[in-house]
Each structure stands twice: as C-alpha cells, then as structure tokens.
Amino acid sequence: MSDAEPIAYSGPRRILSGIQASGALHLGNYLGALKRFTALQDSGAPCFLFVADMHAITVWQEPEKLAAQTREIAAAYLASGLDPAKSVIFPQSAVRAHADLAWVFNCVARLGWLDRMTQFKEKSGKHKERSSVGLYTYPVLQAADILLYKATEVPVGEDQKQHLELTRDIAAKFNNDFGVPGFFPLPDPLIQGPATRVMSLRDGAAKMSKSDPSDQSRINLTDDADAIAAKIRKSKTDMGVMPEPDEALDDRPEVKNLIAIYAALSDQTREQVTAEFAGQGFGAFKPKLAELAVSSLAPVTAEMRRLMDDPAEIDRVLKSGAERAAEIADPVVDEVKRIVGFWRA
C-alpha cells in the first residue's frame, strides 16, 4: 500500500445540517442551530437544511403527529430567517436517496465503529436489546445525509462531533475500498460561538432538552414573553455574584450557562458579558437576560405561529426544497451504485 497522501476532495464547498422532527423546539435549538443556520446561508456556500423525520422514528413517534412536527421544524427554520431562495429546506424522507446511500454505508461501516458511539449507549440505557436497530445505525444514516450532498462542512454541537468523525471514516473507507480517491469529501465540523450546547435552566450539568419532565428547565420557542421572563427569573444560580471576566466557572455550571445564553443572544463573547456585569447580583443580571431573550425570541415565535396557521405555505417550501435536493442527491446515488457494481440498465 502506498504511503502517499490520499487525494483530497476538490468539489464545491457545501454546508448541511438538520433537526429531528420530534417537535417542541427550545432555546437550545435556536442558539445551537437555527441562529447559526441563518448566518451560514450568507457565508457564500450553498446550505442544505433538512427536517430529520427518518431519524425521528428511531424512537416511537405518533404517526398522526409526525407530519405536523415536520412542518413545525420547517416553520422554525423560516421564522428564524432562513430564506428558501438561498437555502434548500426539505424533509429527509422526501428524498429517497438518503435511504439508498445509507444501505451502502451500512455495508461499509464496521460494527466496532458503531459500538463506540456514546449517544446510543446514553439513549438506550440499560435495556439496549429493546432499542430499535435504527437507533443503533442512526450514525450511518447521518453519514449518508451528509455525504449524499458531498457536504464539506457540518455545523455540530460538541455531542455530535463523534458522529461526524464516523462520517469521515466512512467516506475515507468508501473512497479507498472502491478505488475512487476524493469521491466523497471528509467534512469538517463547524463549532462556533459561546452557546453551542445550551444547558438546562434547572441543572447546568444537563443539556436543555424537550424530554426533560420539567418545563421550567427550558425556554420553548412557543413560550410567550411572560413565560420566558418567569423561567429566567426562576432559573438556578448560586449564592455568589456575577464573575470577573477571567474567572473560571467550571464549578458554577448554571452561572456559566446563563452567561453563554446572554452572549449568544447578544452576539458578544462571554468575556464581554462578564465585564459588563462583574460583581453584580443575579437580581440585576436576570432581568436583563429576560429582556434580551424576549426581544430575541418574540419575532421568531410570532412568525412560527403565523406559518403554522398556513401549512400550505410550509408545504410549498418543503416540496420545492425536496425537488432541489433530489436534483443533487440522485446523481450521487446513481454514481455510487455504478461504483459499487450494482446492475444498471
């Protein structure tokens, strides 16, 4: 085997990401994904942003609610400022090439790679034999989602970095196994800003999640101004005051989280926020954070509600996006089938 450097991918720059169609979007989704997507669509690279309804069914979803949840995610995309003329917005399941490529990648990926995926261990808990096969192979479908569009960059949170590393491994193995160097890119992660992982308002060690039984742990994108302000006012802190800019906060996770949220909403660094509020009590900081959160989220909430009242408008965007996505995806799968050796007429 040659020791020469592998041939690098030379195709165009593309950005891809998605959000699961499981409903109940919250502040973590907005800061960790939606707000970033809106900035990325003006970065000069085509953006493919899908609603991950195929990923959603790795755990049980009520069939009569799934389509509505898909529309809700699409409404959040649009309400956050995504422009369907600039970004391709579509439902994952509407582009059949996702499933086609995922099967090929199931045969490229190794069991040992999937056994190392920590998210499956966390989600399946002590009873993994009761989990769906889809939950186990979820990262392979995710690799297909990314490589189907030959995406070169993927906005990810810290908890998704391992899945992107698997995607890179699958791409490299496919390119090598089938003698097609540079066919698939090895996508890079985009981890930006002060709130890539927003934590619970009640527990700074736990990620903000729609599955948390306490509604006080999160700010939902459908919360009104009074609810947002009340949740921030009641959010957990400690007996101290706001830290100095250079102060370590590893032992103050709730305070660290609130500062990160303020920084992300105001487009500042954490150091700028702590410099502004250093030494002040939380009775001064929390009202400012509540005011900022309300002013940032109110327009998004209002536009989401308008769009959800007009599902036909959302459906037009999704249908058009699926057609545009398929124009890119179908030729890639056709070429993969030729490379693998599948019969072609």
Image (cartoon, helix red, strand yellow):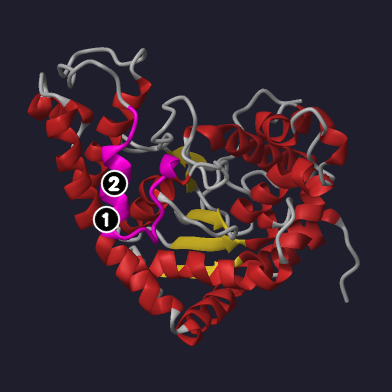
Q: Secondary structure at mark 2?
A: helix
Q: Which of the 4 image quadrants contains residue 172?
A: top right
In percent of the image, x 33 and y 65: which residue is there? 301
Residue beneath disc 1: 226
Badge 2 vs badge 1, beta-carbon distance below 8 Å: yes
Queried whether the magenta region covers residue 230, the answer comes back as: yes
* Looking at the image, residue 121 lies above or below residue 10: above
Residue beneath disc 2: 230
How many marks on residues? 2
* Quadrant in which the N terminus is drawn: top right
| Residue type (three-letter) at the residue carrying disc 1 | Asp
* Looking at the image, residue 94 lies above or below residue 27: below
Q: Position of residue 239 (x, y in %)?
A: 25, 16
In percent of the image, x 18 and y 19: which residue is there? 241
Q: Residues within 10 Å of mark 2 (few under 14, many from 20)?
A: some
Q: Which of the 4 image quadrants contains residue 238?
A: top left
Q: Secondary structure at mark 1?
A: helix
Position of 121 compared to 89: left or right? right
Residue range in magenta is 216-236
* Looking at the image, residue 319 lies above or below residue 178: below
* Residue 267 shows in this picture: no
Rounded to the nearest whole Å, what is the CA distance between mark 2 and mark 1? 6 Å
Decide which of 41, 223 is in the foreground and name it: 223
